[in-house]
Structure formats: structure tokens, C-alpha cells
């Protein structure tokens, strides 16, 4: 695995463009300065959580007695399902998610849902655990990729108001679908790798 591959994969999984409407809906009650502070804080929380899974993921696997092949297959399935939802979001599902976010977070949202699961979701956790267990010698590179992906996602979210005004919701949805198509290919590759490891 290269730095570029890990960086792109993490950005696709964290899906910053797809999270823009959710972040804007959740933070619409706050002033611009407070909104930026919350985005920075939640992005930091997400980075720390994923970094913990990156360095201690191998021990989690041993504790749960999970094989790398099983994790690769399950991670591929999760990524595939997320990619399908990115390509075919469904209006009712998106509206229910928006409604749940606004109803469950009447006050300043801390950790949930902006950090977990919107940024550090199950698929991102599965990816960092799988990568650290398969390439333990490349953890510093994976940490650098995680840092780069987190900074990119944070920058996109900080510019979310401007991006929605300039691009519009239709273009943002098109970008999300394109990212979903790329993520679908990566999910299939992860599934094939898991099947190959299991057969061997």
C-alpha cells in the first residue's frame, strides 16, 4: 500500500462532500465562529479515534480472535454498501437522517454524530484496523495518510457554506456519486483480497 492509495481511500470513505448537508443541517443554529470551532473539535476527535484504532487495531483483532481474511471480507462488504448508498442515496433515507440529526442534537453536538459516525465511521475504523494489521511496518505512513485525509475533510467542511452556494446541492450530490463509484471498485478489491487470503 502506498501513501497515495491510503490517502485517497480514506478521503473516499470519510466522504466530506457527502457530509456537507448533514453538517450544515446539524450546525445551522450556531453562529459562523461557533460552527467553525465545532467542526475543528469534532474533526480532531475523529482523527484521534481513528489513530487509536490504527495503532491498537491488531490487538483488537487478537482479542476478538478475528482473522485478517474475515476483516477484509467484512470491511469490503461495509464499503460496498456505503458506496451503493452514495450512488443511490434515496430521498426518504436522507430526509430521515437529517431529521434524526436535528432531533437528537438540541445542544452543542459533542462526539456524536459529527465525529462518530459521520467522519470516524465503521468503514473508516475497519479500514485502519485492516491496514495496520496487514502492513504493521507502514503504520507511520498510514498515520500520515490519516492526517492528510483528516485535514482535507476538515477544510471541505469549513468551506461547506461556500461550497454549497457555489456548487449547489446537485453538484455536491454528483461528486458524492462519483466518489461512491470509485469506492465501489475499492470495495470489490478488498473483497477479492479477503477471499484470496482465506483460500490461501
Image (cartoon, rainbow, N blue to C red):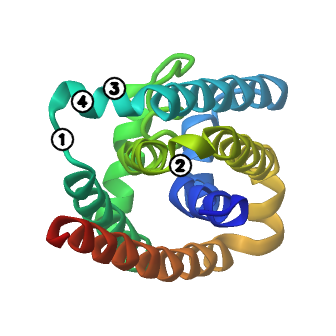
Residue corresponding to mark 3: 59
Provide residue 92's location: percent of width, then percent of height.
29, 65
How far, Cα to Cα, is label 3 from label 2?
Answer: 33 Å
How far, Cα to Cα, is label 4 from label 1?
Answer: 6 Å
Task: Sort mark 4 into few (<14), some (14-19) or many (20+) by Cα contacts within 10 Å.
Answer: few
Provide residue 136's location: percent of width, then percent of height.
51, 41
Task: Sort mark 3 into few (<14), some (14-19) or many (20+) by Cα contacts within 10 Å.
Answer: few
For marks 4 and 2, give the one nearer the viewer.
4
Give the quarter of the image for residue 46: top right
Residue corresponding to mark 1: 66
Residue corresponding to mark 2: 22
Q: Residue at x 62, y 46 (%)?
A: 138
Give the quarter of the image for residue 163: bottom right
> Can you see residue 90?
no
Q: Residue at x 77, y 23 (%)?
A: 37
Residue 132 vs 19, above or below: the answer is above
> Can you see residue 91?
yes
How far, Cα to Cα, is label 3 from label 1?
Answer: 10 Å
Whichever of callouts 2 and 1 sits on the residue coming sooner in the sequence is 2
Residue corresponding to mark 4: 62
> Do the residues bearing badges 4 and 2 touch, measured as CB atoms within 8 Å?
no
> Do the residues bearing badges 4 and 3 touch, measured as CB atoms within 8 Å?
yes
Amino acid at each position: 500500500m502506498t501513501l497515495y492509495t491510503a490517502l485517497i481511500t480514506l478521503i473516499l470513505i470519510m466522504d466530506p462532500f457527502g457530509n456537507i448537508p448533514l453538517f450544515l443541517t446539524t450546525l445551522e443554529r450556531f453562529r459562523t465562529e461557533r460552527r467553525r470551532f465545532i467542526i475543528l473539535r469534532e474533526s480532531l476527535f475523529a482523527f484521534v479515534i481513528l489513530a487509536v484504532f490504527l495503532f491498537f487495531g491488531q490487538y483488537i483483532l487478537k482479542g476478538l480472535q478475528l482473522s485478517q481474511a474475515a476483516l477484509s471480507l467484512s470491511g469490503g462488504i461495509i464499503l460496498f454498501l456505503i458506496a451503493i448508498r452514495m450512488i443511490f442515496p434515496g430521498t426518504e433515507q436522507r430526509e430521515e437522517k437529517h431529521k434524526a440529526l436535528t432531533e437528537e442534537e438540541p445542544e452543542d453536538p459533542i462526539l456524536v454524530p459529527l465525529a462518530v459516525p459521520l467522519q470516524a465511521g465503521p468503514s473508516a475504523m475497519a479500514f485502519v484496523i485492516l491496514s495496520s494489521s496487514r502492513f504493521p511496518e507502514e503504520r507511520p505512513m498510514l498515520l500520515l495518510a490519516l492526517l492528510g485525509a483528516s485535514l482535507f475533510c476538515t477544510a471541505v467542511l469549513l468551506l461547506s457554506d461556500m461550497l454549497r452556494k457555489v456548487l449547489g446541492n446537485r453538484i455536491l450530490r454528483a461528486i458524492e456519486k462519483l466518489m461512491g463509484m470509485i469506492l465501489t471498485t475499492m470495495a470489490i478489491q478488498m473483497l477479492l483480497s479477503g477471499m484470496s487470503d482465506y483460500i490461501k
